[in-house]
Image: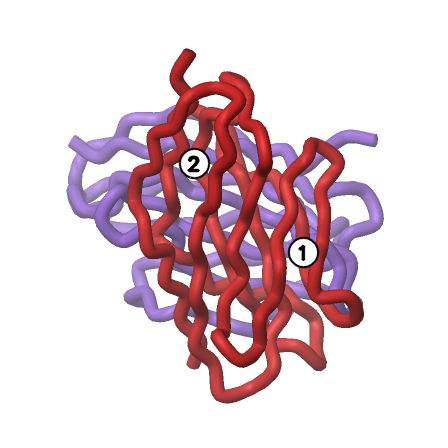
Chain colours: A purple, B red
Amino acid sequence: KAGVTQTPRYLIKTRGQQVTLSCSPISGHRSVSWYQQTPGQGLQFLFEYFSETQRNKGNFPGRFSGRQFSNSRSEMNVSTLELGDSALYLCASSFDSEGNTIYFGEGSWLTVV
Amino acid sequence: AQSVTQLDSQVPVFEEAPVELRCNYSSSVSVYLFWYVQYPNQGLQLLLKYLSGSTLVESINGFEAEFNKSQTSFHLRKPSVHISDTAEYFCAVSVSGGSNYKLTFGKGTLLTVNP
């Protein structure tokens, strides 16, 4: 069974631009969450979606947004990119039931120059 | 809110030596506990998890972790490490009693196994 798939794997953007990252969850998983990983701050929760609704959001500015489609695929968008947005963005999916394992994709490496 | 402290940012060991990666957590509510491993240029893979029941949990590749409620710890151990165990290890918690879709991670411990 295919794992969590993220595209693109690597991208370089210029400060001020915007970026959209895509995530396809494991088949049957309806919960999709996003994390940002940086050397300084570590792994931080961005937001989580279930049935096209954002259920929880981390402590990030409004420039970070996301959405989920009816097939559970998800996208996240970062507008007005800043140098500090350079990070590995990880998508994760799981069944929506207590104690279920959260599976992570390989991530999208974003470099802002 | 929950927080996780991994006491060692780097742990160098020799091959076939035992290793312990330490993790302490803080939470006012019951939590689930996890260890994830990240190999270079890859995402996170679940190593093992504690939800309830026996406080000692094991993974298929020889790692084990013990939940200690009184000390709020969930240390990861392996009796004999291999070169291939070189990776970054993350301890994480989520609030129990609901869907565990939000993980709070520690800063990670880089395990380097030397020949």
Q: Residue at x 45, y 70 (%)?
A: B25
**Does the image show residue B5?**
yes
Callout 1 environment at 10 Å: few (<14), some (14 to 19), or many (20+)?
many
Give the residue number, with chain letter if any, for mark 1.
B49
Q: Residue at x 70, y 65 (%)?
A: B55
Rendered residue at 71%/81% (across/down): B97
Q: Is residue B109 above or below residue A59?
A: above
Q: Is residue B15 left or right of residue B31?
A: left
Which chain letter matches label 1?
Answer: B
Q: As drawn, which residue projects farthest toward the bottom?
A: B28
- Tell whether B95 sits left or right of A96: left
Residue nearest the observer in this picture, B79 or B110: B79
In the rendered structure, which amino acid carries the disc numbered 2? Glu
Secondary element type, mark 2? strand
Q: State whether residue B41 appears in this view.
A: no
The chain identifier of the residue carrying mark 2 reads B
Rendered position, B104 above or below A38? below
Three-letter amino acid code of the residue under disc 1: Lys
Image quadrant where one finds the N terminus of chain B: bottom left
Percent of width and height locating residue B115: 42, 11
Marks 2/1 same chain = yes
Q: Nearer the viewer, residue B93 or B74?
A: B74
Q: Is residue B65 left or right of residue A72?
A: left
Secondary structure, mark 1, is strand
- Circle 2 residue: B88
Q: x%, y% of residue B30?
A: 61, 82
Displayed quadrant of residue A19? top left
Q: Residue B19, percent across and down? A: 48, 38
- Does label 2 or label 1 sit earlier along the sequence? 1
User: Within 10 angstroms of label 2, few (less than 14), some, or many (20 or more) residues?
Assistant: many
- Height in image: A98 above or below A64? below
